Image: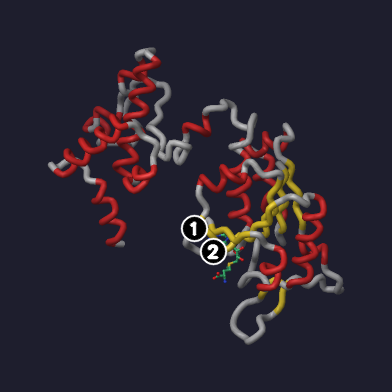
């Protein structure tokens, strides 16, 4: 898979492309990343990439010509790539979008700065605008890294275990992931955690995970994923791939919730309160 990132600050991606899962994907050539700086596509002595907005107002706007030429340069080396402009006004990013894009031959990511980019660049060169959330960042580089990371880990051979990505939250089944535990089996009081002894269940590991019974463990994980999704993101359950028996399990949780246990609706209420 080939990525192009058009950015005024290519150095922001240096550490990101050298470390962890993405670093490994670069090293084993699962991904190739071309960084293109619009400043290298200017023709004036000052290498100008921004200018004041027509109509007045605060801030600067990324100029159309150097940015357009930088995008064209990347398109030339990956003509079949999809071109995305990272923008708070774009389609909100989801795991399903990352899954779809992991099948593409290439993705060109255009990172804006300042007040944004000249609208005509979007009209001429951009296939889709994508947002990583309802908040505003100073530049699109972090959003570009989010997409490079999210897509790369779905490519064959990038993660250590092929099932890892499938078992993550927002996988094909539409559930959140189950809780994870590792050694030691028994956690002593942590330094400074004065209330640790009051929470016995924060010291041990669910016994089933130590049983060695793979069928039971798989069942526990599945139940835990469903319960966690019900508690934290109940709206996901409407589109989750779950069996009739599991639907009944959710109805039971709903009934228990109504009778006084954790209510998922409470989460929504709290969110609205803020
Ligand atoms: C300060 S922002 C410009 C925001 C723009 N004036 C607006 O209100 O829509 C500068 C750049 O950061 C990037 N950016 C900011 N927030 C983003 C988000 N939530 N998702 C993706 N990119 C974002 C975009 O590339 C944008 O051009």
Does mark 1 have its CB less than 8 Å from ligand 1? Answer: yes
Reading the image, the residue beneath label 1 is 133
Quadrant position of residue 175? top left
Above or below for 165 versus 237: above
The structure residue drawn at horizontal position 60% and vertical position 43%, both measured from the top left corner, is 151
Position of residue 109 in the picture relative to residue 225 (left or right): right
Quadrant in which the C terminus appears: bottom left
Left or right: where 55 falls relative to 50: left
Q: Name the N-terminal-most of marks 1 and 2.
A: 2
Q: Which colour assignment does the render follow?
A: secondary structure
The label on residue 88 is: 2
Q: Secondary structure at mark 2?
A: strand
Categorize mark 2 by other alpha carbons within 10 Å: few (<14), some (14-19), many (20+).
some
User: Relative to the observer, which residue lies in front, 154 or 201?
Assistant: 154
Residue for point 30% across, 19% down = 207
Horizontal relation, residue 194 to residue 140: left or right: left
Camera-nearest residue between 210 and 197? 210
Q: CA distance from mark 1 to mark 2?
A: 7 Å
Q: Is mark 2 within 8 Å of ligand 1?
A: yes
Quadrant assignment for ligand 1: bottom right
The picture places residue 153, in percent across and down from the top left corner, at 59, 37
Pointer 1 with pointer 2, Cβ within 8 A: yes
């Amino acid at each position: 898979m080939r990525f192009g990132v058009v950015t005024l600050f290519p150095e922001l991606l240096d550490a990101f492309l050298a470390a962890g899962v993405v670093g490994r994907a670069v090293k084993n050539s699962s991904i190739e990343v071309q960084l293109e700086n619009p400043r290298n596509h200017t023709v004036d002595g000052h290498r100008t990439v921004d200018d004041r907005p027509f109509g007045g107002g605060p801030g600067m706007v990324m100029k159309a010509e150097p940015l357009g030429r930088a995008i064209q340069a990347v398109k030339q080396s990956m003509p079949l790539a999809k071109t995305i402009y990272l923008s708070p006004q774009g389609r909100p990013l989801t795991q399903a979008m990352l899954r779809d894009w992991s099948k593409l031959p290439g993705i060109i990511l255009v990172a804006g700065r300042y007040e944004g980019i000249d609208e005509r660049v979007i009209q001429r060169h951009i296939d889709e605008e994508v947002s990583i959330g309802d908040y505003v960042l100073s530049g699109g580089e972090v959003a570009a890294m989010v997409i490079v990371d999210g897509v790369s880990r779905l490519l064959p051979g990038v993660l250590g275990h092929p099932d890892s990505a499938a078992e993550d939250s927002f996988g094909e089944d539409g559930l959140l992931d189950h809780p994870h535990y590792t050694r030691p089996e028994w956690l002593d009081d942590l330094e400074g955690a004065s209330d640790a002894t009051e929470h016995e269940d924060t010291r041990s590991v669910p016994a089933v995970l130590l049983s060695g019974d793979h069928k039971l463990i798989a069942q526990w994980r599945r139940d835990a994923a469903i319960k966690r999704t019900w508690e934290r993101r109940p709206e996901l359950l409407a589109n989750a791939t779950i069996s009739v028996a599991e639907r009944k399990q959710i109805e039971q949780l709903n009934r228990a919730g109504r009778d006084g246990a954790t209510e998922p609706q409470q989460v929504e209420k709290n969110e609205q309160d803020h």
